[in-house]
Image (cartoon, helix red, strand yellow):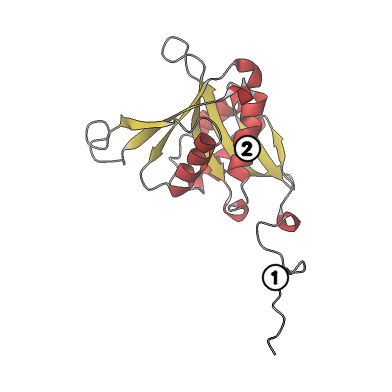
Amino acid sequence: MRPNMITSAPWVLTANSNAFKRHFRFRRPTINDGNRIHALIANCPPLDTNSAYCNFLQASHFSDTCVVAEFDGAIAGFISAYLKPQSTTPNTLFIWQVAVDDKHRGQGLAYQMLNELLSRCSGMNIEYVETTITKDNKGSWALFKKLDRENSGDGEVSIFLDQTQHFYGDHDTEYLFRIPLRNTYK
């Protein structure tokens, strides 16, 4: 006689189950977040650490196109973005950096922040999302490939800044990923 096989075990939870999902608060950054954003980015390699001044500008001048995720009052994630100037590429939101605190990774927070930002920007008539990613940044590739799949699936990748030509060997090549959006966010 064979023992009964358990095919469903409701008492067993996985990391992706709803019981483990954390509740994040999404908001526009403020100038008072600048230092905390700077510290978060510094703890998220391979992201380039810009000056704290840059993060203060992002949190104030570009707050409409950036998002902070908070968990228990602490910054758990941050996306910096801006609208590309109309003279070069109209209706394009350029995602500069996506940072998620180490203890909050693997929970889909980056994608939640990206969706929050795109929903908030819906009145801006954004038609494309662009970002640059180095070849070995697996997390960013996964995030933006998911965004591409859930939209047109017609995203294009090209070299934006070449390791040799632009960085003189001091930085990896940055690939531009351009993703056309459906009407969902317009």
Q: Disc 2 marks which residue?
A: 113
Residue 166 position in % (x across, y down): 26, 31
Residue 89 position in % (x across, y down): 44, 15
Above or below residue 147? Residue 46 is: below
**Horizontal arrangement in the rendering, residue 86 relative to residue 115 (left or right):** left
* Quadrant the C terminus occupies: top right
Amino acid under disc 2: Met
**Foreground residue, 64 or 117?**
117
**Foreground residue, 147 or 168?**
147
Residue positioned most to the top: 87
* Quadrant the N terminus occupies: bottom right
Answer yes or no: is residue 180 visible: yes
Q: Earlier in the sequence, mark 2 or mark 1?
A: 1
Above or below residue 89? Residue 154 is: below
Q: Residue at x 53, y 39 (%)?
A: 98
Amino acid under disc 1: Thr
| Circle 1 SS class | loop
Classify mark 1: residues with Cα within 10 Å, few (<14), some (14-19) or many (20+).
few
Which quadrant of the figure has residue 169?
Answer: top left
Q: Residue at x 41, y 38 (%)?
A: 133
Q: Disc 1 marks which residue?
A: 7
Residue positioned most to the bottom: 1
**Horizontal arrangement in the rendering, residue 45 relative to residue 26 (left or right):** left
Q: Residue at x 58, y 53 (%)?
A: 106
Answer yes or no: is residue 33 visible: no
